[in-house]
């Protein structure tokens, strides 16, 4: 599977943006979270280890809310046995309707329906290394986990961030209380100023908190 | 529900109504009743638009009662699209109203003497049939407006649009929702054309003065209904995901799985999927003053529907379902929700199956008639269907006809019916159901979670490779029961995870009818329904060769998993060996 992650080691191509926004602006980021963002974390470990040890999610939340998991587009049954590699894509969802929705669920009794695309347990197990994983959040997990990821920081491509600012227009800009770029507080009043700021960068390390 | 209304549209002097006791059909409802009447009374080799075919409209076993989710209604006939038996069901208000009026079914039969159009009004006093040629070539929305003017606001309507009048094979039968909009459809199989062939434009129902249907054991029924509702509302899918996002919540998931048919089933992922996802749809609806959580019939506690307003806050359509968003969206390369909602409205107004129309336009796009992603072109094509232009009649006849006219090999159909929104090359199990269902390619034919998966009745092992054949059989059996009960098929998810909710459903049926059914009995019931349908199809000329996916599914790989459909024909032939 092709890695769509932007290159985002700490270098000049990465712009650090810290936003303080009104609570009602948080959902403006949801399309970006659905399309996928990148996090820096230990890889070569199981999804379970990533969720529990790297992200600090509770087993209760994982078991109750994260009912459907895709690793590189393949449905996962056992998160303890599915290995996340550097550059992997990890999509997280709640329980879904529809026969196929139910089929794609973890440990679904209908798992044989999608046997040909399911993740093979334990495949690619290796020594843990630092890397990047693209995460996608869907449906109920947008509200559940979105604010957490936004608060702790995500990497997105600069064009994706431009789309966010452009798509939400002034409504979104009005809800930004404070904008800090590479440690400096700035005032950006129009989409054009955002575009100029982002033009010379490949990716953005974005942190968002509610003020 | 102890009587059947029969309307002989070919009677001397115009259509004539008679009412019979249910007789041999007692204890049947919904799909079981439509399929029983069609298989017993309709000659298997008849022409679907001819005198011998019958259109049967039947509420479910529990419709008209206080049982939550019991408002589904079935429509059955020999299908002009597939040539086999067809049951298509719908939400909306008419099921509850018709059941309270005491009718187990309405049967339209015979052949009209001329091309006049009729409206049928049914209330507690009886049935009135009136010639009304002012309804000719009106869309469903205009027809319902006229009926409101004539009969008031407390009615429910069953109608056809222009497509049904033109007897197009992709036409639907429309049912009004709680806002008296004809937004709910028995979409599949071209049953609107059968209604059109009978010369009946609209059936108006008024249950004023009629009471809720009463169960045999009131207290037991109430208690079971409480458990039933608690089970549905406490489940993650029926209590959270569906109410919050509707069925379109599936777009992101199916796309991520690489099972989202895109560009006429050429690829398994659509780059614009997130833009038309249920998550975006719900946010847009709320922002524009519509509704993201809304029931399609009274008694619905899941409320997976919604109201879609345009940019100016005016009603554009009901919330498009996942299947519609996919068919008019990803399959046609269109990633604009306003365009998709407009297509949904036009389909509803003209009376067209959204799945068949989306897939057909995808085929037309592959033929070069218009480009993938051309939303305006798609809207114009659907308008041509409504206007009845020669091209519109081709499109309105469905994917097979359009594929033949334009010389396209990749036409995703089974038994002549367009495939829904899950590519069987990625999810093989759904392909087993698409291939073998008596209904043609139908995602809801094997939808309900079978009790034997829960450890009741015949056991299957879902994890062994051949489990998908066993599973498909079990799912189709269970679905046949659910489709007969009047329950919305979305209850299936709570049944999957909560055996106590499954039991609550059986308890509801038992308390209502005074039966003592077990889960095994529901399995036997489902088998009876499927056997009737399979037998009809055999008589109509179907063989095992019709239980196959189109050949391209075996030869053309689907990205990103690069798979073909791999279930062997011999395995498919074993689905109905019980």
Image (tube, coloured by chain):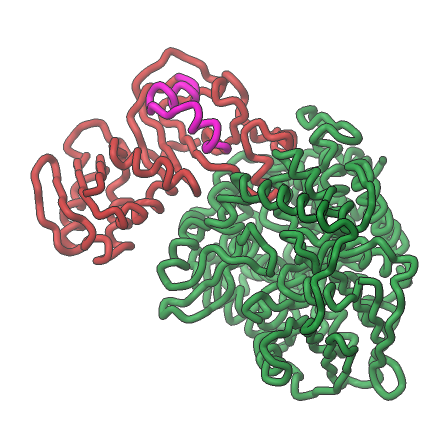
Chain colours: A red, B green
**Lateral position of residue A96 relative to residue B137, left or right:** left
In the image, residue A47 lies in the stretch drawn in magenta: yes
* Segment colored magenta: A45-67
Residue shown at 52% from the left, 48% from the top: B242
**Lateral position of residue B340 relative to residue B513, left or right:** left
Q: Is residue B366 in view?
A: no
Position of the N terminus of chain B by quadrant: bottom right
In the image, residue A66 lies in the stretch drawn in magenta: yes
Q: Is residue B341 above or below residue B424?
A: below
Q: Quadrant of residue A113?
A: top right
Residue shown at 45% from the left, 56% from the top: B292
Q: Quadrant of residue B570?
A: top right
Percent x, y of residue B401: 69, 63
Percent x, y of residue B324: 55, 57
Q: Front-most of A133 and A175?
A: A175
> Predominant secondary structure in magenta?
helix
Residue sitting farthest toward the front? B219
Residue shown at 69% from the left, 73% from the top: B209
């Amino acid at each position: 599977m092709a890695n769509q992650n932007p290159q985002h080691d700490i270098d000049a191509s990465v712009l650090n943006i810290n936003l303080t926004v009104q609570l009602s602006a948080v959902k403006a980021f949801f399309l970006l979270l659905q399309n996928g963002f990148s996090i820096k974390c230990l890889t070569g470990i199981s999804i379970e280890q990533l969720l529990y040890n790297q992200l600090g999610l509770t087993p209760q939340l994982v078991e109750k809310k994260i009912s459907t998991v895709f690793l590189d587009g393949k449905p996962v049954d056992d998160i303890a046995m599915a290995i996340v590699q550097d550059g992997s894509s990890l999509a997280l969802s709640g329980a879904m309707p529809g026969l196929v929705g139910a089929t794609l669920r973890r440990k679904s009794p209908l798992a044989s329906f999608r046997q040909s695309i399911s993740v093979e347990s334990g495949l690619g197990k290796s020594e843990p290394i630092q890397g990047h994983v693209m995460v996608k959040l869907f449906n109920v997990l947008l509200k559940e986990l979105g604010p957490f990821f936004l608060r702790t920081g995500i990497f997105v491509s600069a064009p994706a961030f431009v789309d966010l600012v452009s798509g939400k227009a002034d409504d979104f800009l009005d809800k930004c209380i404070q904008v800090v770029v590479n440690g400096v507080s700035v005032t950006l009043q129009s989409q054009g100023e955002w575009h100029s700021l982002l033009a010379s960068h490949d990716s953005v390390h974005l942190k968002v908190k509610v003020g | 529900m102890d009587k059947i209304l029969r309307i002989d549209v070919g009677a001397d002097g115009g259509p004539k109504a008679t009412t019979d006791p249910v007789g041999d059909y007692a204890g049947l409802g919904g799909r079981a009743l439509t399929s029983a009447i069609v298989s017993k009374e309709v000659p298997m080799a008849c022409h679907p638009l001819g005198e011998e075919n019958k259109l049967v409209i039947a509420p479910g076993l529990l419709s008209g009662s206080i049982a939550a989710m019991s408002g589904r209604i079935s429509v059955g006939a020999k299908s002009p699209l597939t040539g086999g038996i067809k049951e298509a069901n719908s939400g909306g208000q008419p099921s509850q109203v018709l059941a309270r009026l005491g009718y187990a079914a309405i049967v339209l039969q015979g052949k009209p003497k001329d091309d006049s159009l009729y409206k049928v009004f049914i209330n507690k006093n009886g049935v009135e049939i009136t010639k009304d040629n002012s309804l000719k070539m009106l869309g469903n929305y205009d027809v319902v407006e006229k009926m409101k003017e004539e009969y008031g606001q407390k009615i429910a309507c069953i109608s056809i649009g222009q497509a049904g009048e033109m007897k197009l094979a992709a036409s639907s039968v429309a049912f009004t929702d709680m806002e008296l909009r004809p937004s709910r459809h028995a979409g599949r199989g071209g049953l609107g054309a059968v209604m059109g062939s009978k010369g009946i434009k609209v059936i108006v129902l008024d249950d004023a003065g009629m009471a809720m249907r009463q169960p045999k054991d009131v207290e037991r029924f109430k208690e079971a209904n409480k458990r039933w509702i608690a089970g549905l509302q406490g489940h993650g899918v029926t209590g959270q995901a569906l109410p919050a996002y509707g069925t379109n919540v599936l777009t992101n998931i199916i796309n991520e799985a690489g099972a989202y048919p895109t560009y006429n089933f050429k690829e398994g992922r659509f780059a614009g999927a997130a833009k038309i996802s249920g998550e975006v749809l719900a946010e847009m609806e709320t922002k524009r003053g519509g509704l993201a959580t809304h029931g399609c019939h009274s008694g619905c506690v899941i409320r997976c529907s919604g109201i879609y307003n345009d940019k100016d806050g005016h009603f554009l359509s009901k919330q498009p379902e996942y299947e519609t968003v996919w068919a008019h969206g990803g399959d046609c390369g269109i990633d604009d929700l306003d365009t998709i909602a407009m297509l949904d409205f036009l389909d509803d107004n003209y009376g067209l199956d959204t799945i068949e129309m989306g897939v057909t336009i995808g085929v037309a796009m592959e033929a070069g008639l218009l480009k993938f992603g051309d939303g305006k072109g798609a809207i114009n094509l659907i308008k041509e269907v409504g206007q009845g232009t020669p091209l519109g009649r081709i499109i309105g006849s469905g994917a097979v006809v359009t594929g033949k006219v334009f010389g396209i090999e990749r036409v995703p159909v089974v038994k002549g019916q367009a495939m829904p929104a899950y590519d069987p090359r990625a999810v093989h199990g759904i392909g087993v159901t698409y291939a073998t269902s008596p209904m043609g390619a139908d995602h809801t034919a094997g939808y309900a979670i079978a009790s034997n998966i829960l450890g009741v009745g015949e056991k299957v092992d879902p994890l062994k490779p051949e489990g998908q054949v066993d599973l498909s059989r079990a799912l189709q059996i269970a679905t046949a029961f659910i489709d007969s009960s009047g329950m919305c098929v979305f209850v299936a998810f709570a049944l999957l995870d909560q055996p106590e909710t499954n039991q609550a459903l059986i308890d509801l049926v038992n308390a209502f009818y005074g039966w003592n059914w077990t889960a095994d009995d529901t399995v036997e019931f489902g088998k009876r329904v499927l056997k009737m349908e399979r037998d009809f199809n055999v008589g109509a000329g179907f063989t095992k060769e019709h239980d196959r996916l189109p050949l391209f599914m075996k030869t053309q790989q689907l990205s990103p998993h690069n798979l073909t459909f791999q279930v062997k024909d011999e395995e498919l032939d074993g689905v109905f060996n019980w």
